[in-house]
């Protein structure tokens, strides 16, 4: 597997996670304080588009890493749960790094 597959997933995982946190903040302002309806709309549209790109890259990585369906589903859904994508990304990278050609796995830190 090429390292670019993992890199694309990592970038989109972080971008999607950050946009989801921004969207959650916008929703709090929209529904809690009646402010920022236009900003919330723009952020929600941007997050939707970025999430679709994340789905494509995560599915690509999962199919090349030969993940079982349950794991693939969890990785795909992690872009919809605030903060989950950060933790899932770290775990996916640790498990997938040995599959990337030419990269040795890092030893576990205590």
Image (tube, rainbow, N blue to C red):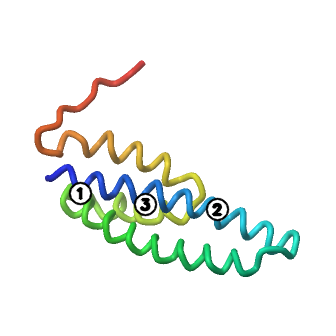
Residue 77 position, x and y percent, is: 47, 65
Corner quadrant of residue 106: top left
Residue 74, which numbered label? 3
Looking at this view, is 31 or 94 the one in front?
31
Q: Earlier in the sequence, mark 1 or mark 2?
A: 1
For image coordinates 49% across by 49% down, the residue present is 86
Q: Residue at x 12, y 44 (%)?
A: 101
> Mark 1 to mark 3: distance in Å?
18 Å
Residue found at x 46% / y 54%: 14
* Numbered disc 1: secondary structure: helix
Q: Residues within 10 Å of mark 3 (few under 14, many from 20)?
A: few
- Give the answer, above or below, for where 94 lies relative to 28: above
Mark nearest the camera among 2 and 3 is: 2
- Quick one: SS at disc 2? helix
Q: Which mark is residue 5?
A: 1
Foreground pick, 36 / 68:
36
According to the picture, the residue beneath numbered tag 2 turns out to be: 22
């Amino acid at each position: 597997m090429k390292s670019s597959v993992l890199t694309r997933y990592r970038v989109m995982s972080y971008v999607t996670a950050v946009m989801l946190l921004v969207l959650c903040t916008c929703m709090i302002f929209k529904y809690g304080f009646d402010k920022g309806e236009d900003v919330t709309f723009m952020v929600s549209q941007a997050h939707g588009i970025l999430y679709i790109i994340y789905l494509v890259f995560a599915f690509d990585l999962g199919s090349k890493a030969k993940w079982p369906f349950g794991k693939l589903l969890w990785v795909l859904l992690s872009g919809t749960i605030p903060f989950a994508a950060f933790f899932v990304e770290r775990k996916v990278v640790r498990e997938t790094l040995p599959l990337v050609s030419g990269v040795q796995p890092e030893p576990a830190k205590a």
